[in-house]
Image (cartoon, coloured by chain):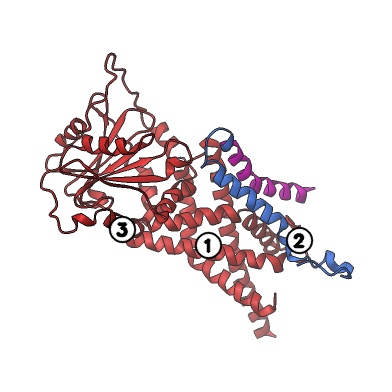
Amino acid sequence: MSQSTIQIWSWLHKWSSLVCTLFLLMLCLTGLPLIFHHEIEHLTGDEYVMPDLPGDDGLESLDTVLAEALASRPGEVGLFMSFDEDRPVVNVTSGPAYDAPERQMTLMSLDWRSADFVPPPVEEGIMAAILQLHIDMFLGLPGKFFLGAMGALFVIAIVSGVVLYAPFMRKHDFGTLRVSKSPRVKWLDWHNLLGVVTLAWASVVGLTGVINAFAEPITATWQSTQLGEMTAGYRDAEPPAELGSIQTAVDAVKAASPGMRVQFVAFPGGLFSTDHHYAVFLQGATPLTKRLLTVGLVDAVTGELTDIRPMPWYMQALLISQPLHFGDYGGLPMKLLWALLDIVTLIVLGTGLYLWLARRKRSVRTLMAEANA
Amino acid sequence: MSRPAAAPRSARQRRSLSAIFLIPVLIGLFSLVGLVSALTGDGLRDVLSWAGLAVPLLAIAWAWLRRRQ
């Protein structure tokens, strides 16, 4: 690599890092407790134990469950319905309108066997605040896009850092940590080592974070393309005044896709459906197909299946980006490894910032020495 | 990226790109196997993920221990 090429990459590394470092420090710090949010919520809250309901193995109709939930929220409508994987619980999200923003939504959990309320997942307190800071810094969609852009700069910093690794390591073995009086040399070696070994993990978590930050525009694209194609015949129809049975809608999609599990249902009028349909999202039965969703659209009035298709690649990419960013798909040991790698990334960011500051100080000193000569 | 056969002994001082990146690329591949494996299933695939993601951390531990000696 020629001297001028090195200079271009160093410029790129310096500025991409400098712009994103403070935000990345915040993301790594808030991300650390979020890795364990499930465990922390279990520790702080009383864990609810599902009661035994002897002689009542059957499940209530989803229409009954929905009616019970909405009875507690007068004037509101149902927006989403999702189903716990490990217990017979239906989660109902309601809001003042079908296109209500997220902050106006209410999440309720009900026992599928009795349509009685059970405690909903904890959504308030310090963990919720940390999550909001991590997602959008309390700035809504613009905050999300901004952090997404910071993530993209982080990826550029990683790539340029890897390119610069070569000229730095020309004369050193992998893993060299020089014993030196100069803290700059010492931290440079640590920065190079920690940065290069976490390259793959940090790139994947960074890139999937960027994808997650753009979830809304990606979903809106899917809604206007795939959902638009699937429901071309409804283009000029008026939105339904009264919705038909949700149980019928779920049954219609289940009948068309044996062996799949219903993950959630989106009501007409929201981001995940059309104005005229219940969108029923199905997941496969194996761990691999569990994350790849198929969407079935059911006419919200007649209860007849309109169309059923696997979601397109960019929605699958969005879906797969969630576990890859959260690290929640391989048990507690994986979460611990995720936390350690997060801490290593914090050190890479911190040493990088130090190296820049130390360099500035030295160059100022050099300038002063010249001035005093 | 391979050196000519007549390269001087100073190769110990100036490493080729492949020599510089061999170990980092291997660590990256182990990490990727670790990232993907647990997505595809449970049980053994989880264990493979833990092993793969532990590789970068073990490399750090190795470099640190080597320095102390």
Residue A195 sits above or below residue A62 on the image: below
Would you say the residues marked 3 and 2 are in contact, meaning their CB atoms lie under 8 Å apart? no
Residue A94 position in % (x across, y down): 21, 42
Residue A159 occupies quadrant = bottom right
Residue A121 position in % (x across, y down): 33, 36
The crowd level at tag 1 (other Cα within 10 Å; few <14, some 14-19, many 20+) is many
* Circle 3 residue: A220
Confirm whether the magenta stretch covers residue B51: yes
Question: Rounded to the nearest whole Å, what is the CA distance between mark 2 and mark 1?
Answer: 24 Å
Residue at screen point 76% across, 61% down: B19
* Circle 2 residue: B19
Amino acid type indicated by mark 3: Ala
Amino acid type indicated by mark 1: Val
- Magenta span: B46-69
Residue A314 position in % (x across, y down): 41, 56
Q: In the rendered structure, the residue with mark 2 lies on which chain?
A: B
Q: Which chain is red?
A: A
Residue at screen point 19% across, 58% down: A235
Amino acid type indicated by mark 2: Ala
- Earlier residue among tags 3 and 1: 1
Q: Is residue A139 visible?
A: no
Residue at screen point 44% across, 58% down: A210
Direction from residue A232 to residue A183 in the image, left or right: right
